[in-house]
Each structure stands twice: as structure tokens, then as C-alpha cells.
Image: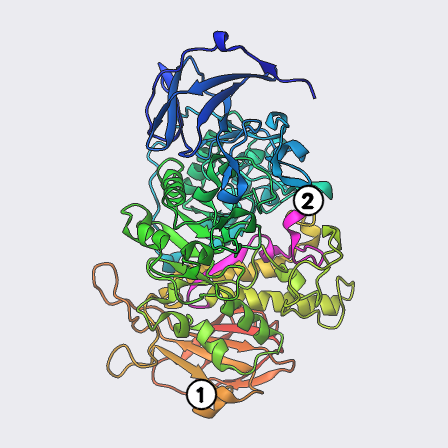
């Protein structure tokens, strides 16, 4: 590594006083203002970096309310910069100032470079945590970039699609296009690649309405992963909350990533697709107290992280309090950490035009005095914010602790990932359900979780798979995880997969067995798309993506994780069922209702809005719900009329539906009940080859459902 150049004090440009707001680097035609929060530092240097490895240090002399600031003339957009701070070295008190460490601005709008695992990235001497490291970290760390972006949004406006009309598609920026033969090679794995017609048209044709991007905040891999030759592929290791990850930019990392990200959002919006970000505010890439010092920790440890206590009850950051499993927990009860999160959220909404956020391990951010509190600082602030309270807000309602599991508890306007839906629908289709009662509750919107406090069915984000765990194909192909490629002797990842290999572990050439697996995958996709609530599909599940049994592919930036777009191994029958189910959902408001079903008529003399049918054709009775052998159920949904009024208060009328779910391993005889409201219908969706779409039926008919099938009848 070549030595860093040092320009003398006499050669530096004069630093103007500047201003303490806004934080970060703000470019202007006359000068660029720099402002950074470090109230306990005694000295602060702004460091400008050139392309030859040179560094020019400018001492900031102005401090206002803990913010160091100054303005420099002649700083062009694209200039790279960082900070060095001096002050007390007392790690036990949260004071870790070390001028040998070049720090990334927490409010940088773009980041250049990557992290190299080296002893210099630690603020202490390895093996001796109490001794300050004399090594210069500058050659090994990413730095901030001065950004001036004049992107033309045209008439782009928030789509503000209602939750009940939303279908989410969770995808990875790189994994979506890395192997896509219809995306130009130089754009694969990038924001620009996602914006191509090959991707946008595919998503529109499938029928989803929103993309949920796995983390795109600037992130870095953990040093331990780098030592194993792996990386943090998923991106749940954030280093900066304002910068689009530079590794996903085709156009460069000197600020170009900002414009490229905006162009991607605009392309999605032009196609009617919302953009939701998976955000990781609960911890940072600096890990535990013995982790690297890259940004936050170097400015003031105690401002950002929840710390432990020593024997005397005093602060002891070396015993970080961790409920994320990642070494540290961001303390959203600290005023400046709270400001950082809120400013970041507003920035992504106002400047980047995103439509919402999914908060990773949200329970960790709700803690007050270490206890989960639904009146916490962050929840209260977002709920009162006139901008943020109107975007899509999704909580992952748990963290890594025993007391962090809070499914069904988050207040309006939050919706939640519903893992109880995931588990019970998986169990139903693998014949491990204790009965039909809880499955019916999930199909109808999980009223046990969301109805008692005035929320709606759409407060449940229904999913069967997510990025974390088996893919849908692997769910019907493997009973055990196969994570050997992760280098942890297959110890990582959950053992609670609720999967079923149907008799053979792994892939097989047995056509009959593959057919059963594909039908089971189609059954689960149809169930997901037609359940009340908001469906979330994991990218590639609709076409049979496999991770070869790896249920924790967070470190696999390769074909294990990427979507294979070749048609020869695609489960196109699953794709067609998914597309058909989403089309039914989109075209029929009866299948995506706002109000809870009440099990009674919406008008006098009409049918019940929801009725559950036994295979014999009668309504389910009390003892039926506790029959452990019952694995077939009919769900009648009335559209005549709907309980919800139309946009002008008009009564809405839709077709009525009968959905049959047969999870048994044998064919099941069913009887369509005689009734006064629906006399004829047709098969609108089917995973049963003996009852194809278009088959006509009438009240009183006796049908035989094939084993493990879904059949949807629509009134005609």
C-alpha cells in the first residue's frame, strides 16, 4: 500500500465558518458546507481525498450545540471526504476518539469505496482493547462523497395504493438480475438493471403492485465473513442510512448511484409499482465493542448504541446490550440517534421518492429502559410526523430476544409481518396442523391478532417464505437445512423449517414426485394470494427458485441466491397459478376486503358474508373445528353485496366465490350446498387436473377433489 500524502498546514485552503445545518455535506456554487455531530470531541478535521491517494486535512474551528461545521470553497461534486476526531480515549465511558481513524460521515449522501479487513480498521490495538491503535485506517475504509444531484422527476408522485390493493414482491437488487439474459450484461445486478423492461414488465404481468428491496442502505461485510472468503449478500449490516449501496450502481460510486437509484424508482412508478425499502436501523456494521470503528462509534459511542453496565452500575460500552444478535443495538431513545433515523426516513421519502419501509427487528427500536414499549420514542415520533405516518410502514414485530416477539401489538398506522400465518399455512399443507380452526382464521385475515384493537385484515402481511429460510421450492424438497457452503458446519440457520420433502431429500428425477412437489408449491401460492390480508411473495418462488436446501443464504453472493431465469428448470405451472390467483384478487374486491367478515348477511335476507363448509356440504359446526382429522374445508365468500361501500358510498356488488382447500393425501368427496343465492359457477382456478379452469358446476353437485389441491369456484 502506497503511503498517504500529507499537505502542510500552510497549503490548506481557508475554512469558512459555515453553518450547523443541514448535517452532512451540502454543495453550493460558492462553497460546500460540512456539518457533523460530535459533542464530546475536542478537535475535528475534515479530510478531503484525491484520486492519487492524497489527503488534505482542514481543521474545523466552529462548533454549535455539539455540531462541528465549516464551509470550503471550490469543492466539486464527487469529492470524497471523511473526518478525523481527537478527544478523550476512555472506552469504558464511551469515549473512543482516535485521530488515526478516518470516519465516514453518518449523514453522507453517497459512499465511495469498500471495506478491507485490516487491523487498522479497529480503534484499539488487537489483543489489547484498552490501548489506542496507532494505525491509519484511511486506505481500508469507505468514505463519503459530496453529492449534487439535479435529477428530473418530471411529474412523479407517490402512488399511495391502498393496503388492501397491495401485493408485495420481496427481491434482492443483485439477485433479481445477475443471471437475467434479457438484461444487458453491464446492467445486471444493479439499480439500472431493475429498471429495464425485462424486469418491470415481468412484475406487472405477474400482478404484483410493490417491490420490497432487501437492504440498499450502504452496507459492508463483517470482517469474519471476509476471512472465510464470503460476504454479506443480504445487506443487513448497514454502515450509512442515507446512501444507496454503491455496489449496486452500474454508473459509479462518486454520487452517480443517487441518480441511478432515482431513475429506478421512477421506472417502477411509471409502471404503477411502489418501492418499499427493507431498512436496518436496529444495529450497525460496527458490531460489538471489539468491532471496527468506521463511523458512528468514532463520533461518540454513547450517542448511538445501547450500552451495558459495570458492577458499580456505571456505563460500560464494552458490554454492549444486544437484542439484535449482531453485537450492538441502536438506542432510538437517544435524541440524536432518533434524529438520525427520522432524518433518514424523511430523506428517502422526499428526495428518493420511496413509498414505504419494512423495519428489520422493529422491537429492538421500541425499547424504553430495555423494555418493549408501544409508546416508545420512535413509534410516537413517526405516528406524529405529517409525512412519515402516511407512507407504508411494515414492522418485523420481533427481535433476537425472548421478550421481543410482539406480533399483533404494533399500533396504527403499522402493519406487520405475520409469521403465524407462515407457520400455520405450512403446517396445513404438510398435514401437521392440529385442526382446521386456526387455518381458517389465517385465511380470513387473522382476526385473533388484529381485530380486537380496531385494525383491519390488511394489517397482516401474509407470507409463506421470505429471504430468510427455505425458498418455496426447497420447502417441498428438503426437510433439513443444507448450509455447508456457509462455512459454519451447518450449525447456522433454523431447524424449525416446517418443510416436507415428500419422501426423498433433495432434487430427484422422479417425475411423479416432482409433480406432487410442484402442486404443493402451487397450492401454497394460491392460498397466499387469496387469503385476506396483504400477500408477500419472495422473488423467484413463483418460478421454482432453489437455494439447494440452504435456509440461511445471507453470505452467498452467487448462483445459490440468484434467480435462474432459464426456462428449462422453471416451475411454470406454479407461475401460471400465481398469476391467475393475483388476477382474481385484483379483479374481485370480494377477495381483498377492507372490513372483517362477520359471518352474517350484509343485507337482510342475503347470504352470509363468509361461511365455512364441511366436505358434506353443510356449514361447519362447533365440534368440526376441533376435529384433528379434518383436512378439507370450503370457504364461501359472498359478493352480493360487499360490506365495504364504494368510493362514493355506493353499494358494491361482486361475484361470490367458493374456495376449497384439500390437504389430505387422498381424493376428497365434496358436496356443493343447495342454497337460495348461488346456483351456478365455473372453476376459476385449480391445481386439480381433473377439475380444470372453465369446468361448470351447479348447486347440489357432488365433486371429487384430487389429493392436495386448491379449487376456486366463481359464481356465473
- Classify residue 352 as left or right of residue 515: left
Q: Which residues are magenta?
A: 531-558
Which quarter of the rendering shows the C terminus? Answer: bottom left
Question: Which element carries disc 1, helix, strand or loop?
Answer: loop
Give the number of the mark in front: 2 or 1: 2
**Circle on res. 620:** 1
At which x and y percent is residue 463? 51, 62
Q: Give the number of marks.
A: 2
Question: Which element carries disc 2, helix, strand or loop?
Answer: helix
Which residue in the rendered view is the most extreme toward the left? 649
**Marks 2 & 1, CB-CB < 8 Å contact:** no
Which quarter of the rendering shows the N terminus? Answer: top right
Question: In this rendering, does residue 303 appear at all?
Answer: yes
Question: In this rendering, does residue 204 appear at all?
Answer: no
Of 300 and 461, the residue lying toward us? 300
Q: Return the disc, 2 or 1, that comes first in the chain's sequence.
A: 2
Categorize mark 1 by other alpha carbons within 10 Å: few (<14), some (14-19), many (20+): some
Name the residue located 62 percent from the left edge and 59 percent from the top edge: 469
Name the residue located 73 percent from the left edge and 54 percent from the top edge: 488
Judge whether 526 appears above or below 266 on screen: below
Which residue in the rendered view is the most extreme toward the bottom? 623
Please check the rendered image and state whether residue 21 is part of the magenta-colored stretch, yes or no: no
Which residue in the rendered view is the most extreme toward the right? 509
Of 172 and 80, the residue lying toward us? 80
Check disc 2 and report the residue beneath it.
224
- Classify residue 424 as left or right of residue 551: left
Amino acid at each position: 500500500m502506497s503511503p498517504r500524502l500529507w499537505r502542510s498546514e500552510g497549503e490548506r485552503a481557508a475554512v469558512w465558518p459555515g453553518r450547523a445545518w443541514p448535517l452532512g455535506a451540502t454543495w453550493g456554487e460558492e462553497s460546500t458546507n460540512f456539518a457533523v455531530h460530535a459533542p464530546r470531541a475536542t478537535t475535528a478535521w475534515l479530510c478531503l481525498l484525491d484520486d492519487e491517494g492524497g489527503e488534505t486535512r482542514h481543521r474545523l474551528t466552529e462548533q454549535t450545540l455539539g455540531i462541528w461545521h465549516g464551509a470550503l470553497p471550490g469543492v466539486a461534486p464527487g469529492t470524497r471526504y471523511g473526518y478525523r476526531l481527537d478527544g478523550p480515549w476512555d472506552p469504558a465511558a464511551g469515549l473512543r476518539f482516535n485521530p488515526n481513524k478516518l470516519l465516514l460521515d453518518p449523514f453522507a449522501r453517497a459512499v465511495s469505496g469498500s471495506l478491507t479487513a485490516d487491523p487498522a480498521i479497529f480503534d484499539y490495538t488487537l489483543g489489547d482493547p484498552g490501548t489506542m491503535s496507532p494505525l491509519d485506517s484511511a486506505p481500508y475504509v469507505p468514505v463519503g462523497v459530496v453529492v449534487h444531484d439535479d435529477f428530473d422527476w418530471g411529474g412523479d408522485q407517490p402512488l399511495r395504493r391502498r393496503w388492501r390493493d397491495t401485493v408485495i414482491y420481496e427481491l434482492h437488487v443483485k439477485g433479481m438480475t445477475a443471471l437475467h439474459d434479457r438484461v444487458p450484461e453491464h446492467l445486471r445486478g444493479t439499480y439500472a438493471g431493475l429498471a429495464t423492461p425485462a424486469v418491470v414488465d415481468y412484475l406487472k404481468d405477474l400482478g404484483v403492485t410493490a417491490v420490497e428491496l432487501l437492504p440498499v442502505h450502504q452496507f459492508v461485510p463483517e470482517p469474519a465473513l471476509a476471512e472465510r472468503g464470503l460476504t454479506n449478500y443480504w445487506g443487513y449490516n448497514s454502515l450509512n442510512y442515507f446512501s444507496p449501496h454503491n455496489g449496486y450502481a452500474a454508473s459509479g460510486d462518486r454520487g452517480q448511484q443517487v441518480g441511478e437509484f432515482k431513475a429506478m424508482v421512477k421506472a417502477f412508478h411509471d409502471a404503477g409499482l411502489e418501492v418499499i425499502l427493507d431498512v436496518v436501523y436496529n444495529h450497525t456494521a460496527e458490531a460489538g465493542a471489539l468491532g471496527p470503528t468506521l463511523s458512528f462509534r468514532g463520533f461518540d459511542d454513547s450517542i448511538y448504541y445501547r450500552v451495558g453496565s459495570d458492577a458499580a452500575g456505571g456505563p460500560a460500552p464494552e458490554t454492549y446490550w444486544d437484542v439484535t444478535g449482531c453485537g450492538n443495538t441502536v438506542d432510538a431513545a437517544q435524541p440524536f440517534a432518533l434524529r438520525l433515523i427520522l432524518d433518514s426516513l424523511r430523506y428517502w421519502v422526499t428526495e428518493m421518492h420511496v413509498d414505504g419501509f419494512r423495519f428489520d427487528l422493529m422491537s429492538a427500536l421500541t425499547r424504553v429502559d430495555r423494555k418493549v414499549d408501544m409508546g416508545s420514542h420512535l413509534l410516537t415520533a413517526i405516528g406524529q410526523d405529517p409525512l412519515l405516518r402516511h407512507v407504508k410502514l411494515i414492522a418485523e414485530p420481533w427481535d433476537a430476544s425472548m421478550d421481543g416477539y410482539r406480533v399483533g401489538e404494533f399500533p396504527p398506522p403499522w402493519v406487520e409481518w405475520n409469521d403465524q400465518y407462515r407457520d400455520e399455512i405450512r403446517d396445513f399443507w404438510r398435514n401437521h396442523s392440529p385442526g382446521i380452526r386456526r387455518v381458517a382464521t389465517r385465511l380470513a385475515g387473522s382476526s385473533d391478532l388484529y381485530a380486537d384493537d380496531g385494525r383491519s385484515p390488511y394489517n397482516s402481511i401474509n407470507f409463506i417464505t421470505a429471504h430468510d429460510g427455505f425458498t418455496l421450492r426447497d420447502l417441498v424438497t428438503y426437510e433439513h437445512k443444507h448450509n455447508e457452503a456457509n462455512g459454519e458446519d451447518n450449525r447456522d440457520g433454523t431447524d424449525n423449517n416446517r418443510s416436507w420433502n415428500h419422501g426423498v431429500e433433495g432434487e430427484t428425477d422422479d417425475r411423479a414426485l416432482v409433480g406432487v412437489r410442484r402442486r404443493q408449491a402451487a397450492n401454497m401460492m394460491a392460498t397466499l394470494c387469496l387469503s385476506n390480508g396483504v400477500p408477500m411473495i419472495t422473488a423467484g418462488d413463483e418460478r421454482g427458485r432453489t437455494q439447494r436446501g440452504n435456509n440461511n443464504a445471507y453470505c452467498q453472493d452467487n448462483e445459490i441466491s440468484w434467480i435462474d431465469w432459464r426456462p428449462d428448470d422453471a416451475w411454470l405451472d406454479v407461475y401460471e397459478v400465481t398469476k391467475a390467483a393475483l388476477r382474481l384478487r385484483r379483479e374481485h374486491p370480494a377477495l381483498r376486503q377492507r372490513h372483517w367478515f362477520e359471518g352474517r348477511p350484509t343485507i337482510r335476507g342475503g347470504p352470509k358474508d363468509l361461511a365455512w363448509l364441511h366436505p358434506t356440504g353443510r356449514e361447519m359446526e362447533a365440534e368440526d373445528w376441533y376435529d384433528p382429522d379434518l383436512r378439507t374445508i370450503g370457504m364461501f365468500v359472498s359478493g352480493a353485496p360487499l360490506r365495504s361501500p364504494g368510493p362514493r358510498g355506493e353499494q358494491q356488488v361482486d361475484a361470490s366465490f367458493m374456495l376449497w382447500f384439500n390437504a389430505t393425501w387422498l381424493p376428497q368427496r365434496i358436496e356443493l350446498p343447495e342454497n337460495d343465492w348461488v346456483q351456478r359457477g365455473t372453476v376459476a382456478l385449480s391445481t386439480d387436473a381433473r377439475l380444470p379452469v372453465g369446468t361448470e358446476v351447479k348447486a347440489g353437485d357432488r365433486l371429487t377433489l384430487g389429493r392436495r389441491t386448491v379449487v376456486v369456484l366463481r359464481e356465473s
